[in-house]
Amino acid sequence: MAEGPKVPPVGEVMSSPVVTAEPSETVAEASTRMDDHKVGSLVVVDGARPIGILTERDLVRFAAASGDASATKVSEWMTEDPDTVGPDLPVTEAYASLASHGYRHIPVVDDGALVGVVSLRDLMRISSIQPVVHPGEIEAPKGLAGVIVAETEVGDVRGQEGFYHYRQYSATDLAEKRSLEAVWHLLFEGSLPTAAEAAAFRDEVVPLRAVAPTVMANLPAIAAAGKGGPLDDLRTAVSLVGQAAGMRPSLDISAEQLRADALRVCAVVPTLVMALHRLANGQEPIQPRDDLGYAANYLYMLTGEEPSPEHARAVEQYLITTPPPSPPGSSPRRAPTWLPPSWAASAPSPARCTAAPPAGLWT
């Protein structure tokens, strides 16, 4: 049995020194420090001992509560007694801890003292990429440590040949002749829809564009507090969608429920993107329209004006013909499989999959 890829320890990927705060400091001071250092969390310390963590999520919750940042202590909003990992722990095990708890950051402690912090993004950067082979030819170490292997029928990317397809169809041919909704049906159901199937699929998807009121109420705070850019804001919003819809890990639900959850996430993301964009620019979100196609509705929620058919079709073709980027080293003949085994083993919901770093989305 061949040895699996060497798994580095957390100490090789953690960020150090750590940006910290004291529990007696104000939320305003902590928020300013996070912004100054361009970090998504602060570890709250008592001397060298971590006693809490304050993250962007906490600041979003605080903003939604309309509190006074200059009069509120960090200790009131931090997560107390956070889970920690040691610097010698393999990154795959650290990833499993993050995935199982839904964390994005975890302090690294050695002999009771804070020595670093590791984030989901840190771990994704160093995740192994393995070529896809037939399952019968796989040589994997015990526990599949460091091995990422999957087959997909969704697409075949041939970068060196300038060709790729969705299932059995050329992507460029689909963009020329089919609607985005038809390609969406192809990916979900395995076949291009008949006229009746296309109508039924549209009727199923259109109501899912709406953002739940509990999620919409938090979008202004997310847009106001977001410091990492639109993708970080979207990641937080999608997490709230999953929570509001009660999405459960994929292994705990039926195939029908998994399909429904995935459809909901796909349908609502354009609404979230445009709502967050408008809020960040001091504008009110525009509700989706049921009578417009996917791309036309996307543009409508941006400007409030119904786009011309030419503009809508151009965006639609762009969306169909833009494949997800392949991480360096992935096979040019397959859509890359790039989720660490610990993440796959945790079987997260579609919302949590989408909230993972973008490089891990194409499986």
Image (cartoon, rainbow, N blue to C red):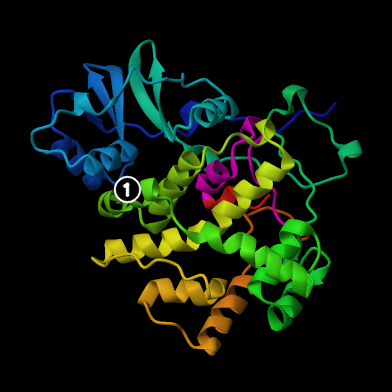
187 relative to 128 in the view: left or right: right
Instruction: Name the foreground residue: 35 vs 354.
Output: 354
Where disc 1 sits, the SS reads loop
**Residue 203, percent across and down?**
63, 64
124 relative to 65 in the view: left or right: right
Can the viewer see residue 129? no
Number of marks present in the image shown: 1
Q: In this view, does 248 lie above or below 23?
A: below
**Residue 21, percent across and down?**
21, 29
Q: Is residue 150 magenta?
A: no
The residue positioned 43% from the left and 32% from the top of the image is 118
Q: Quadrant of residue 286?
A: bottom left
The residue positioned 43% from the left and 43% from the top of the image is 240
Can the viewer see residue 307? yes
Q: Give the range drawn in magenta.
A: 335-357
Which amino acid is tagged 1? Asn
**Residue 330, percent across and down?**
69, 53
What residue would you read off at disc 1? 218
Q: Which residue lies furthest to the left in this view?
A: 71
168 relative to 70 in the view: left or right: right
